[in-house]
Amino acid sequence: MKKLTHKKNVRFIIVLFRFVRFSFNGGVFVETFPWWTESQKKLAEEVEEFVEENAPRAAEALWTFENPEDIVKKVAEKGWFGTLIPEEYGGMGSEVGVTGACIVVEGLARLGPLTATYSTTCFGGTHQLVRLGTPEQKEKWLPKIARGEQLNALCLTEPFVGSDAAGVTTRATRVRGVYN
């Protein structure tokens, strides 16, 4: 059997990405829903175009086992790390909301592991910071996250539990103003 060259392998992966993309929903990127706002529908169109433009580079990064930081930067430039962040902190606010973040995740999933960077930042830290952070924490971190300057994650583990949040038994107890 003839060994394929690197360029031929990259071309094969690009063709495969395009086939997979168009094999879902009969060639439609993502099915829109009647309750979506015009902003969400527009976002879906933008994500579709972005995925199409960046599929070759994503395929190459996947093949060469590299993190496509150039594509992550483009995601940041689009402002998509701010889908869950209120406008007052530089995000998209309620304009697209959680549905918008899901639209972006679904699209970026077609670019391979890049979606992990996006979804971990949005759902593994940002969401919690927006809902539970102090005003000082929000002011310090949310603008940086919205601009894509700060990527974050929520890390959770415990012996014999791993990352099963429901199985965690460790508790913080406040004693004389200090948590132990």
Image: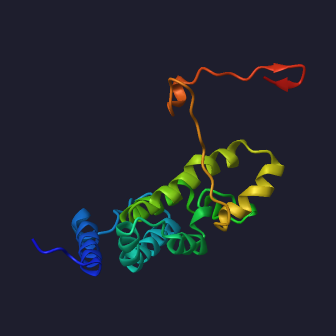
* Residue in the image at 76% along x and 20% along y: 173
Side of 7 relative to 65 (left or right): left
Q: Is residue 53 above or below residue 143?
A: below
Q: Position of residue 9 (x, y in %)?
A: 25, 74
Q: Is residue 180 above or below residue 12?
A: above
Q: Position of residue 51 (x, y in %)?
A: 40, 73
Which of the 4 image quadrants contains residue 18?
bottom left
* Residue in the image at 64% along x and 22% along y: 170
Quadrant location of the C terminus in the rendered image: top right
Q: Position of residue 71 (x, y in %)?
A: 50, 73
* Residue in the image at 35% along x and 71% along y: 59
Kindly give the residue lying farthest to the right in the view shown: 176
Q: Position of residue 35 (x, y in %)?
A: 44, 57
Side of 115 relative to 12 (left or right): right
Quadrant location of the N terminus in the rendered image: bottom left
Which of the 4 image quadrants contains residue 81?
bottom right
What count of labels does the image hold?
0
* Residue in the image at 55% along x and 62% along y: 96
Q: Is residue 125 above or below residue 23?
A: above
The colour scheme applied to this rendered structure is rainbow
Side of 91 relative to 42 (left or right): right
Kindly give the residue lying farthest to the left in the view shown: 1
